[in-house]
Amino acid sequence: MHKQSYLFFIFLLLLNTAFAQDSWIRINQLGYKPNGIKVAVWCTKSEKLDNKKWQLIDDQSGKAVYSATTGKSSGTYGPFSETVRLNFSSFIKPGKYYLKAGKAKSPVFEIGEDVYKGSADFCLRYMRQQRSKYNPTIKDSCHTSDGYTLYGPMPDSSFINVAGGWHDATDYLQYVTTSANATYQMLAAYRDFPGVFNDGYAANGLEGANKIPDILDEVRWGLDWLLKMHPKDDWMFNQVGDDRDHVGFRLPQNERLYGRGYERPVYFVSGEPQIRGKYMNTTKGTSSTAGKFSSAFSLGAEIYGRQDASFASLLSQKAITAFAYGLKKPGYTQTASVKAPYIYGEENWMDDMELAGAMLKDNSKLNYAFELAQKEPVTQWFIDDTAAHYQWYPFINAGHYELSKKISGKEKQALINFYKQGIEIIWKRAEQNAFYRGIPFIWCSNNFTTAFAIQCYWYRQMSGDDTYASLEQANFDWLFGCNPWGTSMVYGLPSRGDTPVDPHASLLKIGKYPTDGGLVDGPVKGSIFNNLIGITLYDADEYAEFQSDLAVYHDDAGDFSTNEPTMDGTATLIYLLAAKEAEGSKKKVATKPVNAKPPVVANAFTYDHGAVIKGDSTQKKIALVFTGDEFADGGFYIADVLKQENVSASFFLTGNFYRNPAFKNMIRTLKSNGHYLGPHSDKHILYCDWTKRDSLLVTQEIFANDLGQNYEAMSSFGIKPTDAYYFMPPYEWYNDSIAVWTNHFGSQLINFTTGTLSNADYTTPEMKNYRSSDTIFQSILRYEQTHVSGLNGFILLLHIGTDSKRTDKMYYRLPELISYLKRKKYALVTIEGLLNL
């Protein structure tokens, strides 16, 4: 990089940063299909947006390929003074693009037929992670002693085996309410779009194809648990555990919270109010839970009838007995709590029994189902524009959709009109803002958004009317970044986008397991957030400038109201993503499972303060990383060992290192041997305070100059910035601002994976934190042997040289270390090979 061009780049960078803080363009980060609706939202805190020019720019050529002028601004929305829709649906050429309007520039996005490919399968990762009994993420058993009965015809505290199913969210409670709905949604996704789903995992959730689409493995896990929860014709259970579970982040293996060892309470569907502690629910009957059982069993029987006749027969029989149980006492069943007033306070049931009646194999209850459809034509939250927690659930009435397939004439048209009535109610609110947002900002708003998008899709399929197609797409786009915060609401999807990195999730917070594919709750009204019990944000709010009284969203593990992934929301999203992938392709009518390994659409990376600190923990790959500034005594030795072992590694070196004449031959050797060479800052200066991490010690201008000079020093070895995308910060110490500035520079911040003492190989004997090479080596082995995922995805940091005061050089243990890792079947790759961003 020449000095003049570099200084000009810095000027543009700072200029762009100054302007980029008051105008934004929000897009669907997953991308858009060529023949689909393509709309972004331009939002600002200062500009006037009426009649302004905007452009679609080809990312590769930098040339404008489409331009237009805005119409009238849609006015204020949340934190923005003005917003306007940018519609480029008529542009259909596949490629990568970005939008530019006024002072705003969008992230790069793709237009292509395969932009949603693999996304539904990706969300199945979260469903597998939620498994109880055996959890394939932690590769351990949990909750195998469930449980002891309450409120049933048998004596209280009788043991019943109900181990299995899915944990509901970050807590480990289990509800038929959500589990049966999730099972139905995934069964429907496979039935309607079988060609979308692939086979990469075994029935137990561990990696390895078994010639069964992964989604069928998952629904079988759910169905098996539902059968345990309805073991006899007159026995039906509603939930396992209660809110005594809410005791903070932890892993699920060894819970003893209820005073009976490892057993948890199992609540019977009694049709009567239930109380534990000081809170009583308002249960009125048995129908809402029983109806959900029945519909899941019926659809399961339909699917499995093609491959497992005895299992399908059992499901058909259970669908009948569950339906009868729903007639036992018409009314809704709520969940029970002990410590807090938060329950699934469902207050409708006719939608559940309508769906159950529509799904029964013998079609004997179609008239009954249509009677119920007329009594609940529109789910009540559409009308009220609010709801208590899960008051009207499921958030979409699937009964209308299923029943419409079995009746005709005026009755069928009535069902279509019921959907249209609900959509029109939302549209009247949505058309007043640029985001087409008509969904209430209440708890689990993303689940409502997903359900509503599906209702729009079903209406379009049933009626052939695409009047609301733009509204449908806007709700889908909202989930993946076309929202005030510009973030996807799904962990890890897309892999290179702005997605949740710090969700309220125990397995991530404690176990460091990525919650890939989990749909978080979503934004709520500011008033709701401020009045919830037990919420404390752990970190500074990176979305502070986008919060408003209208709605808040926090990517913070402390916020269970907006940033907690949920099992049922994710299962419903799987249906929507499958529909989007299949639309316009032949996948919808596939007749047999596709057994190829699913494509990787997002990476299971671990982030800390905006830096990637670990690769995919499900892959046996490790990146050996060496940093260097003033010392290089191990350089040639390390190069020789790596060559002998046929291993590639990565070296992050400062500008001081690259400019040092004594090190030039070594650098050339490393480069010629195919190792990755990257930046480590120019002068090895400390960017932020050791104790007050949020306190910066450099300005953005100083940072940009430091990193730029590092790249300039690398250019003398023929290393371009595009060849060295990853940046390891000096002292391996940084904060969120450094991560953001690195991204503005066009690079990706990384850091070493914590858990071992490898980074202490620079210490000298007089230091308090001195660690011998043997201590360091044993810490690596100990971590590998005591963690379920071993060293999978590790960025293992060592130093290319150390002070002469340290005579016990860790790099002399490199042959032994590599030998051990090879015996354990790890692939040793460069940082590019590990992350491939």
Image (cartoon, rainbow, N blue to C red):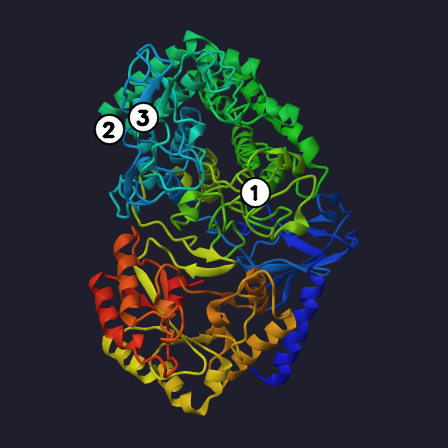
Q: Secondary structure at mark 3?
A: loop
Residue beneath the point at 42% across and 56% down = 605
* Residue matched to label 2: 308
User: Which mark, residue 536?
Assistant: 1
- For residue 698, above or below residue 514: below
Disc 1, disc 2: CB below 8 Å? no
| Mark 1 or mark 2: whose residue is earlier in sequence | 2
Residue 538 percent across, percent down from the top left: 55, 48
CA–CA distance between discs 1 and 2? 49 Å
User: Which mark, residue 96?
Assistant: none
- For residue 122, above or below residue 612: above
Quadrant of the image containing the N terminus: bottom right
- For residue 771, above or below residue 264: below
The mark lying in front, picked from 2 and 3, is 3
Q: Dot 3, how many residues are within 10 Å of its Cα: few (below 14), some (14-19), or many (20+)?
A: few
Amino acid type assigned to the residue bearing label 3 in the image: Arg
